[in-house]
Amino acid sequence: MEAELVQAETTSPRVLIIDGDPAFRRELRSNCEQYGYAVIEAETANDGVREFEERAPNLVLLEAVLPDGSGLDACRNIRRSDPKVPILMVSSRGEEIDVVVGLEIGADDYVVKPVRMRELLARIAAHLRKARLDTTESTAGRLEFKELVIDINERRIFKEGVEVDLTHTEFDLLAYLASHAGKVMSREKILNHVWGYEYPIETRLIDVHIRNLRRKIETNSSRPYYILAVPGIGYRFTSART
């Protein structure tokens, strides 16, 4: 049985569930396994971080409130360890400030309980698909702008020659906007391309990630040069090249 588990984990996408509710973990495990995922469980933040370091999952599902403290701290620790792995917060805390904070500290997505299981599974599949394509597909490209270089092949960003650490989603968002420099990209197009399917726009998912990106690549995030908002439509990346 142990050998079968090891084999499953090496051939199937590994999903780490960090949640203090055993009933929710059982339900989510059952559904994930039906989709062919190898599931790893943890009840606390400390156990979750340890499982992440030891098992290297392909995706993390994380509750913001855990028995031994804040899932936000676990999110920070996981994000410091791996800036690329998709992190989906699945939380009982659904106020706008909770969503914003979760995304600002590094989560790629935020789902409020009680969850619609089919929607959650669709989000999991979308994130795993994007992560898999990013590691198997190579699109030649090196985009150069004022003080900013985006290496599409290597998935690396440099500002004034210094590498900037971006999350998986932040890179996809920046690369998409920069690849269409000068064009206004609607929220719907951004959501569909970067996240893989339609999201409720009122979650401010895009806005929070844009704000995080500006903090990392703009000289003055309150007066952005690269990423400009187009009210009522979406965002436009500067068309000025080096």
Image (cartoon, rainbow, N blue to C red):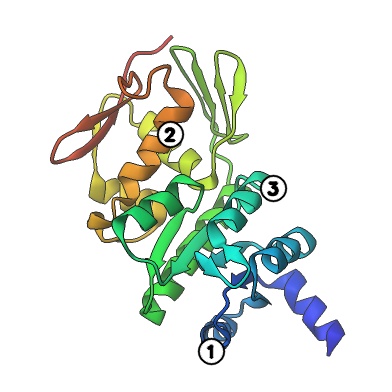
Residue furthest toward the top? 242
Tag 1: Cα neighbours inside 10 Å, few (<14), some, or many (≥20)?
few
Mark sitting earlier along the chain (2/1): 1
Residue occupying image coordinates x 85% and y 85%: 2
Disc 2 or disc 1, which is closer to the eye? 1
Name above or below for residue 45 compared with residue 102: below
The residue that disc 3 covers is: 81
Q: Amino acid at mark 1?
A: Ala
- Give the residue at x 27% y 48%: 189
Q: From what the image shows, is residue 61 above or below residue 224?
A: below
184 relative to 109 in the view: left or right: left
Picture quarter with the C terminus: top left
Dot 1 or dot 3: first in sequence order is 1
Q: Quarter of the image holding residue 174?
A: top left
Q: Which residue is mark 1?
A: 23
Q: Is residue 33 left or right of residue 239?
A: right
Instruction: Label 1, secondary structure: give it.
Output: helix
- Name the residue rendered at 44%, 45% in the picture: 104
Q: Name the residue furthest left.
A: 232
How many other residues sit within 10 Å of disc 2, few (<14), some (14-19) or many (≥20)?
Answer: many
Query: Spatial distance from mark 2 to mark 1, Cα to Cα?
Result: 37 Å
Disc 2 target residue = 213
Q: Is residue 222 left or right of residue 59?
A: left
Disc 2 to disc 3, C-alpha distance: 19 Å
Viewer-side residue, 85 vs 36: 85
